Image (cartoon, rainbow, N blue to C red):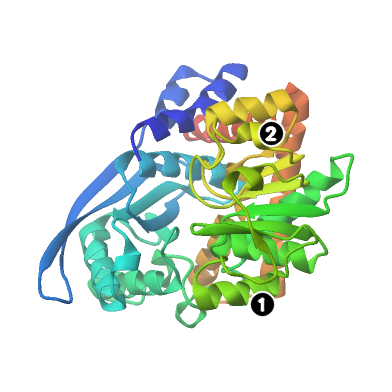
């Protein structure tokens, strides 16, 4: 991903900053990253050869607390991508009210082409390369695209070996057995569902049907929770294809099918459709839960949904965003909609620090409170400025960040 993604990421920020006449010194601070770490990671492969991989960690801003954000394994990982994602993390963490700044990292490769042993060695080598830049009170990574609790356990273990004690708080999204939090796996999807419920309260219709683009951890749990709460999930797309059932897909069966085949294709409870057909489905909510730039100038005019819900990071291009505004389609931005994951990551970090762990119901109740309050605050700003939810979210975040700079004497 090129530097262009970071420029795109800052556009709504600049629009919001202009509306509230943000002090230029604070604007400049928020547009700069504190650190960009780039490392070469030599790895001995299973066949005895050695390959060198490139890894990144972008640390955007820590005025409100330690850097916080995921680590992804993907062929498109680049400096521009992690810069954009870490910037979004600063905004997101501020909106949802957790005391973190923004960070993001990754390694450029295709994890599907590696063995489990190779993945572990690469993860541990990456941890050694960035060890001086991370820590429970410095920078706290988490899972992201193609990483998972096991990945975090390896990072935590390698970091702990280096510092000489079990530093559970160095990462979040860990397995329960090594300091993870109950409720973390489904947190992003559940948080997005709480936002969906709040959006419905402010709409003149009931949310009955959903289409979900992306069926990894986040999209899968969002679809499951919608299904469990009586919504019809009419279509689901993953990286290999799309299935649809106008009467609603049986999501538990689709999840089992996905586990067995690693794709939604071939699911007997739905028919395969094209990308064009998917985006043109007449649903209440179009949930974007895959990758950046999913909704763009080539498909946005097909959209008939009443609400576009961004659970992925940056799934809507600025051009598509403008079209949605013209069509009167409400968009709930990523920096609000997908904040459930980092909210529960915060809960995990707190539990690691105090050495006391909450039951899942308590975690989910705390999550609901954070997400509904964040939605309410952003909605109020949208009404105050008579603007869209994305611009309002940035205004809300910028105001909070500017106040912190003011209080700290910058």
Q: Answer left or right for 394 relative to 115.
A: right
Q: Mark 2 highlights which residue?
A: 389
Q: Earlier in the sequence, mark 2 or mark 1?
A: 1
Q: Is residue 394 above or below residue 258?
A: above
Q: Is residue 126 above or below residue 386?
A: below
Name the residue rendered at 46%, 18% in the picture: 24
Q: Residue 294, how many percent across, how many down?
A: 53, 43
Q: Residue 187, how many percent across, how many down?
A: 61, 63
Residue at disc 2, secondary structure:
helix
Look at the image and tell me in which quarter the C terminus lies: top left
The answer to whether mark 2 and mark 1 are in CB contact below 8 A is no
Q: Quadrant of residue 241?
A: bottom right
Residue at disc 1, secondary structure:
loop
Distance from Cα at disc 2 to Cα at disc 1: 33 Å
Q: Residues within 10 Å of mark 2 (few under 14, many from 20)?
A: many
Residue 359, label in figure: 1
């Amino acid at each position: 991903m090129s530097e262009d993604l970071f420029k795109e990421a800052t556009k709504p920020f600049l629009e919001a900053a202009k509306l509230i006449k943000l002090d230029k010194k604070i604007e400049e601070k928020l547009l700069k990253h504190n650190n960009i770490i780039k490392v070469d990671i030599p790895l001995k492969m299973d066949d005895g050869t050695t390959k060198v991989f490139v890894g990144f960690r972008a640390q955007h801003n820590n005025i409100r607390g330690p850097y916080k954000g995921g680590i992804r394994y993907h062929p498109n990982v680049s400096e521009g991508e992690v810069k954009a994602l870490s910037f979004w993390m600063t905004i997101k963490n501020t909106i949802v009210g957790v005391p973190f700044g923004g960070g993001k990292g990754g390694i450029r490769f295709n994890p599907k082409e590696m063995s489990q042993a190779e993945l572990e060695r690469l993860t541990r080598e990456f941890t050694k390369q960035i060890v001086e830049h991370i820590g429970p009170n410095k920078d706290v990574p988490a899972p992201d695209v193609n990483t998972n609790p096991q990945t975090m356990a390896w990072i935590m273990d390698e970091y702990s070996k280096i510092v000489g004690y079990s530093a559970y708080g160095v990462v979040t999204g860990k397995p329960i057995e090594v300091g993870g939090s109950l409720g973390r796996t489904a947190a992003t999807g559940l948080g997005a569902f709480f936002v969906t419920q709040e959006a419905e309260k402010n709409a003149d219709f009931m949310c009955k049907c959903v289409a979900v683009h992306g069926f990894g951890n986040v999209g899968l749990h969002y679809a499951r929770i919608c299904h469990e709460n009586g919504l019809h999930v009419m279509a689901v797309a993953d990286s290999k294809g799309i299935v649809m059932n106008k009467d609603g897909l049986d999501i538990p069966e689709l999840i089992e099918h996905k586990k067995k085949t690693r794709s939604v294709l071939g699911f007997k409870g739905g028919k395969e459709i094209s990308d064009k057909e998917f985006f043109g489905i007449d649903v209440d909510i179009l949930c974007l839960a895959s990758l950046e730039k999913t909704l763009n100038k080539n498909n946005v005019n097909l959209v008939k949904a009443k609400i576009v819900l961004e659970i992925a990071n940056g799934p809507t291009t600025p051009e598509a965003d403008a079209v949605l505004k013209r069509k009167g389609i409400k968009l709930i931005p990523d920096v609000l909609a997908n904040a459930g994951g980092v909210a529960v990551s915060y809960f995990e970090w707190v539990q690691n620090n105090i050495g006391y762990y909450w039951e899942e119901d308590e975690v989910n109740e705390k999550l609901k409170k954070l997400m509904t309050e964040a939605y309410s605050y952003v909605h109020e700003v949208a009404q105050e400025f008579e603007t869209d939810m994305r611009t309002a979210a940035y205004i809300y975040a910028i105001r909070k960040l500017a106040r912190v700079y003011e209080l700290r004497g910058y």
